[in-house]
Amino acid sequence: MSCTYRYPSWKYGRYTEVKETFWFTKLSGKEPVDLRTDSDYQDRVEYSCSEKSCSLRITDLRESDSAEYKFMFITNQQDGKYSGLPGVTLRITDLQVRVNSLQASTRWAELICHSSCLLPGYLRYIWYKNGRIIQGQTSSYCSVYFTPTDSFSCAVEGHENFRSPPLYAPKLPSVSVSPSAEIVEGSSVTLTCSSDANPAANYTWYKKNGNPDLQPLSKDPQLVFSSIQSSDSGEYYCTAENELGRRTSKYIYIDVKCE
């Protein structure tokens, strides 16, 4: 992206000299942060500036680079800071695999390779299952048979290096308890459930009690006891679920001691 600018050559009884030029997206306090010193852009920005023009080049673009980019030049005059408004708005999107329709009983799904960008013309797509190309699937839609261990991704033909993040069911959830030391009545205890999944998993907590129609204790990743009681002792487990599947954690045993 580039910017051209003008300024008065004579002001306040002296010639104007441009002392500094840079691009920015953020402020630190009230001061703009030069992209060259911004850790989010480390070693990824280049300026090509000449008299009254300056261009910005960003390499290894990331979705997090989506922002409004502004140019500033600073002169030797007392009020010599100038910035163009509005700036240049840059929006970067990744391809995403989404579930368009699903038949859970037969494990068939129709997936779509989605981009929020308006992609030009007729495009051919490449679909991947577990990292291997799915032969014969070249449209933005793909019908697949899936198991809980499968992953799917897509790319536009000719741009295979820019493959979408994989879509997959939740992995086996892990559970933890905090604090990990002895638990006494009246203390605060938190159980945490986590699972690797894309799209992100939805969590549900249960307590094992032999009832096949268990009522969920929580639908959050964490189950929090603000003042735990001895009656809360027992085995707990969680489930992690997204559109492609559901996994159940191992049990975690909580033993609440009386004071």
Image (spheres, rainbow, N blue to C red):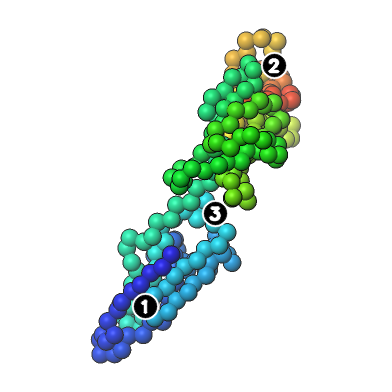
- The residues bearing labels 1 and 3 have C-alpha atoms spaced at a distance of 29 Å
Q: In terms of sequence position, does the residue under pointer 1 or pointer 3 come before the other? A: 1
Quadrant containing the C terminus is top right
Query: Looking at numbered disc 1 in the image, what kind of residue is underneath it?
Result: Lys
Q: Position of residue 230 (x, y in %)?
A: 68, 20
Residue 96's place in the image compared with 48, above or below, is above
Task: Identify which amino acid the numbered label 2 is placed on.
Answer: Lys
Q: Is residue 124 left or right of residue 169?
A: left
Quadrant of res 132:
top right
Nearest the eye: 172 or 129 = 129
Q: Amino acid at mark 3?
A: Arg
Which residue in the structure is indicated by mark 3?
Answer: 62
Mark drawn on residue 208: 2
At mark 2, the secondary structure is loop
Q: From the viewer's perspective, is residue 194 above or below residue 157?
A: above
Which element type, helix, strand or loop, lies under badge 1?
A: loop
Residue name at image x 73 percent, y 23 percent: 251
The one of 106 and 139 positioned closer to us in this rendering: 139
